[in-house]
Amino acid sequence: MPDKQLTKLRRYLKSQGKRYSLEREELLEVIQAMDGHFTIDDLCKAARESGAVGADSTIYRNINVFVDAGILDELRMPGGKTVYEKSRKSTRHSHLLCSGCGDVRPVKFTDECTDHFDDICEKSEFSPVSGGFLVRGYCSECNRKIDKD
C-alpha cells in the first residue's frame, strides 16, 4: 500500500481528533485495490472478500472519512446513485454517464479544457477543490439497442 495514502489518512484523522485503527488501515488497502468507479456496495463486497472488514456498517460509518481525507472522490449521480473513485487531484477529468445502463466513464481534461475550467473559476472568484463535468447520454451499446427499437 502506498505509504503516502496512509500518511494522508493518519494526518487527517489526527487533525479531526479521530482515532487511527487497524480496521481503517485495512479498509484503505481495499480502497487502493479498487479500480475505476465503484459503489459503496462494491467496496463492502471487496472488503468482505479480502477479510479486511467484518461488517458493512464499518464501511458505511467510515466512507466519509476517506472522502474528507482526500483519498476518495464522491460522485453524486442523477437519480440518487453515488459512486466513488480514488482521488486524482493532479488529473482533472469529467464523466460520461449513460442514461441507459448507468455506466460511468472518466474523460481526462485536455490542457485547453483545464485552462478554460481555471478561467471560469478565476472569473467567478471560486476556488475549486475538485471538479469536472457530468455529461449524460447513451453509450455505444445502448445506442445500438435504441436504434434496433
Image (cartoon, grey):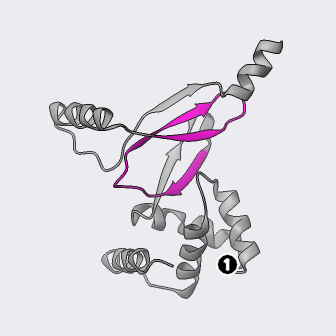
Question: According to the image, label 1 marks what residue?
Answer: 53
First to last magenta residue range = 82-107
Horizontal side of 108 relative to 63 (left or right) equals left
* Residue 103 on the magenta span: yes
Disc 1 on helix, strand or loop? loop
Residue that sits furthest to the right in the current view: 149
* Percent x, y of residue 128: 28, 45
* Percent x, y of residue 56: 69, 69
**Quarter where residue 48 is shown:** bottom right
Residue depicted at x 42% and y 42%: 93
Residue depicted at x 19% and y 32%: 124
**Viewer-side residue, 79 vs 42:** 42
Horizontal side of 24 relative to 38 (left or right) equals left
**Viewer-side residue, 144 vs 85:** 144
* Percent x, y of residue 25: 53, 81
**Viewer-side residue, 73 vs 36:** 36
Quadrant (top left, top right, bottom left, bottom right) of the C terminus? top right
Residue 101 vertical placement versus 51 (above, below):
above
